[in-house]
Amino acid sequence: MEVPALQGLGQRRLHTLEETLPTSQERESLKIGVPRERHGEERRVALAPSGAQALRADGHEVFVEQGAGRQAHFDDMEYTDVGAEVVGEPEDLYGEADLIVKVGPPGDDELDLVQERQLLISALNLGGTSPAFLRRLMNLKVTGIGFEFIRDPDGTFPIVRMMHEIIGSMAVQIAARYLESGASVGGAEGKGVMLGGISGVPPATVVILGAGVVGEWAARTALGFGAHVIVLDRELGPLRDLEHSLDRHATTAMASEQYLRQATASADVLIGAMMSTGERSPLLVTEDMVAAMPGGSVVVDAVIDQGGCIETSRPTTHSDPVFRAHDVVHYCVPNMPSNAARTATYALTNVLVPYLVRIGEAGSVNEALWRDEGLRTGTYVYRRHLTKKSLATMFGMAHRDIDLLIASGI
């Protein structure tokens, strides 16, 4: 039963701080559906068996589509062993569940399966979102919560951060592989260099563009290999924070044209990790800078899904991940965590399960959004309304404030 949040708003205004806020009188047993991912070479699954077990222990039903965890090396028996029900057809799963949790947003074929008033929790993938997709969810009165928007009270984006940690670490692992002599790209082998070097042989130089989460974890991983690490950013604050967290083991510099040219000219590995929230990644490295890099060097543009920050980058795929430009190997695959599907699934499960538990404890979606700031900020569509101003601006659509919608009980 939904609790009118407007009543709660009135009590917040009129009663003293010691007054207890209204709460739902009974928990809600959720029916949670976990479909198999079908699009974008996605190998992750939204919920590991351990997550299904935790939700079952909390009194919820979990439905997992047959084969949903196969590419992350979770077989169907692991889900049934912890009390989840494996469902053969996606139509049956969507028809049974009142809450769908996915990695990627539903494709056009899956939108036909989404039920009226379902709760959908997934990535929105801004680059592929369309007004038609949003309107379809709104017409179905779906409550849509996007991974990219879920923000905790401390200002962090827990799911985004978790995936960015994985991307940063993977970027260095990938670069190390393509530096090896046996890595053939475009008919030429890798330059045969170890990241860390050995006694008497200096290490490789890894240049990282951006001192955010992706850049930090790329630097940590490269330092772990023993590489010489240089991090550049356009702002001094993030560089100062990075120096402190890495105990000054990495060299930092402002991303001026002079320093960019000097750093890239000596780079064995160049990692693009510069991001601007809600905007295209800034283009920092020009084609002539790439042309001046040593032959056989490796570029990993880890923010290619936001446009990339290296001029010669273009999106590639997991099945065809690399190309050469100016004798420099380029790896520009969006959705890099899909290649660490098992690790990424566990990471996603660790963040998602507490949110799902809190939805059940609230007794209704309306009350859960009212209580939980992370879920509320994560909501982009709610019962026929678009609730994100950034999306409304992007697509020229009207939007309504989520706080007012919940308070009014719409």
Image: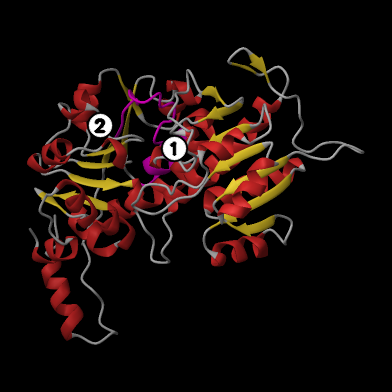
Q: Residue furthest top?
A: 187
Residue 152 is left or right of residue 141, and the answer is right
Q: Which residue is mark 2?
A: 106
Q: Secondary structure at mark 2?
A: loop
Is 54 a magenta residue?
Answer: yes
Is 181 a magenta residue?
Answer: no
Residue 352 is left or right of residue 331, and the answer is left
Res 124 visible = no
Q: How many marks?
A: 2
Image quadrant where residue 265 sits = top right
Question: Which percent across, then down, holds residue 220?
Answer: 66, 49
Q: Residue furthest bottom?
A: 16
Magenta region: 33-58
What amino acid does circle 1 point to?
Ile
Q: Residues within 10 Å of mark 1 (few under 14, many from 20)?
A: many
Residue located at (18% from left, 57% from top): 366
What amino acid does circle 2 point to?
Pro
Image height check: is 3 above or below 198? below
Image height check: is 147 above or below 191? below
Question: Which percent across, then down, holds residue 324?
Answer: 56, 23
Query: Which disc, if any, is residue 304?
Result: 1
